[in-house]
Image: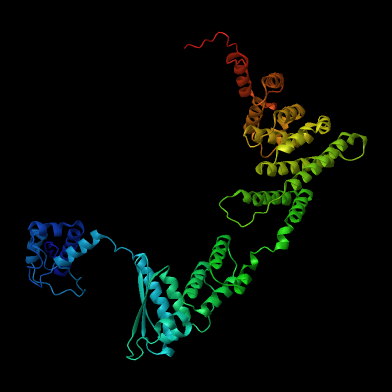
Amino acid sequence: MLLSPPQPPRSNPLSLSLSLSLSLMAAAESLLRSGEVSAMIRQGFISSPTSAAAGARLSPKFSSPYSSPPSLSAAAATYPSPPPPSLPSPKGSTLFEMISQEDLSRRGPPPPPSSGDQKRRRLEEMITKILSTEGPRWGPADVELSVSSGDGFRFSMAVHRRVLAGRSRFFAEKLEGIGVALGSPVVVEICECDDVEVYAEAVGLMYCRDLRLAGKEVPMVLGLLKVSMDVMFDAGVRACLDYLEVVPWSEDEEEKVISVLSQLQLHEPLNEILQRVSVEPSTSSGAGTIFFRVLAGVLQGKDEKARREMKALLSGLLGEGKDQRKNYATKIDVSRETLYHFCKKCLNSLHLCLSEAAKADEGRRDRGSIMGEVAREADNIQWLLEILISKRMCDEFVTLWADQTELALCHSKIPCMYRYEISRITAQLCIAIGKGHLLVSKEARISLLRTWLEALYEDFGWMKRACRIFDKKMVEDGLCQTILTLPMAQQQTILLRWFDCFLNKGDDCPNMQRAFEVWWRRAFVRQYAGNQDHSGLQIAA
């Protein structure tokens, strides 16, 4: 068998042509992305597309001289021209198109339409929708209505004279006799209106056979009401009033509705709408009775969670009377007499509960249930005291609480775990005095601390551990400030007694070192003599 020498592999001309085409396409795309094409044209290396032949294109078959390596060109010339490939060749791009695409990519996306354009487009869609359904029965439009606002926004719409004049007494008066003889369109311009969108909406409503405003927002309807009143569009006014009488209002919307309706010359419809917010004289005169009933219900309620929620609710409602920004015609508030009536009632109940608790060992009642009532009454007094302090009515309560010597005696006979809620009343008063929110006489302050300060020392540890909301520093600051408002003799007595108590109880006693330091400096460092001897002073002429 004769073996022929091995023949070198022959390249396929079609394969080589496709490879060359793809390489040239990749090179062109790389130049486009890098921006070198436009740069080389600007620098004169490549002629401008405007001066080149109209049919010259950068394609895989006809690339520029500098983009094709000589080796590839020589290799392609050694083989006969291949037949055209069956696959479609990708479309090339001219240099001008490549530069344009490059410039567009640098500029970024087009800016979004302005708010005025969006509003205009929305109004055009609304008017077009209305006229496409209701306009044909009125024939061709014969009035061009242009509405503009103070900010320069203007909107024009082609409408019908018969609709404007038939629905609006204002337009009927203005259009009477204008352009009728010649039959030419009439141009009507309304300038300086508050809201162009609302005005266009009102004109659109004139075309509607059934004026239903369901789905509209309250501010939009208020605007439609004002425009309808201005152009004397009676059906529109009636539709807006019917809507406002039915639809619920938020608190902000309520104020807007009252403000707008109070400016309109309406009588019977206005009263119907404002019945939901108007107060009858009989209701106003019975406010004291309502407050009494509400407070009594909270103080006597059985469910603790519901009581806490209602206390927070009423405290917030009663505090709204202090908001000077609210300009109400009359402000009805709970009376001083009502609050002190319940304070005295709660104090009597607290005294009775403590007396029963002290005798609970005799087998009359279970001490646990009695202590629950003690905590409940103490909590009621704290809540009433919070209201009195917020309303600057608490001066009388300081004297009332300081006079409870029998209650303080019963308190000393009950274990701390049952009675510590009572000492929170004293702490609450001292905080208010220390912050300057409560101004009472020197005698009332001395009597308050003489009656209840020792009890507060004893209960302080339980107050820290058992109270869910207890600000130790706030209580200590209030005590310090209250003690330092007393005469020096009372400061010395109280602070020396505290000194011994703190050494024995430690953290279970309020820390009043700051008051001790101030008293010490006043007494021994910066002494002030009230009656100084001025006999040595001389007046020089």
Question: Residue at (72%, 61%) from the top-left corner?
Answer: 283
> Of 226 and 281, which appears nearest the observer?
281
- In this picture, is 530 found above or below 486? above
Total number of numbered labels?
A: 0
Colour setting:
rainbow
Residue 15 appears at what percent x and percent y?
A: 17, 67
Figure quadrant of the N terminus: bottom left
Q: Image check: 15 left or right of 424?
A: left
Residue 372 appearing in the image: no
Residue 466 appears at what percent x and percent y?
A: 71, 36
> Of 178 and 207, which appears nearest the observer?
178
Q: Image check: 198 left or right of 430?
A: left
Question: Residue at (75%, 26%) from the top-left corner?
Answer: 450
Residue 330 appears at what percent x and percent y?
A: 64, 56
> Which image quadrant is residue 361 in?
top right
> Of 53 and 68, which appears nearest the observer?
53
- In this picture, is 124 found above or below 286? below
- In this picture, is 541 found above or below 69? above
Q: Image check: 235 left or right of 41?
A: right
Q: Image check: 181 left or right of 322?
A: left
Question: Residue at (74%, 56%) from the top-left corner?
Answer: 290
Residue 241 appears at what percent x and percent y?
A: 57, 73
Residue 252 appearing in the image: yes
Question: Residue at (54%, 70%) from the top-left corner?
Answer: 264
Can you name the residue that lies furthest to the front here? Answer: 541
Can you name the residue that lies furthest to the top here? Answer: 536
> Of 95 and 257, which appears nearest the observer?
257
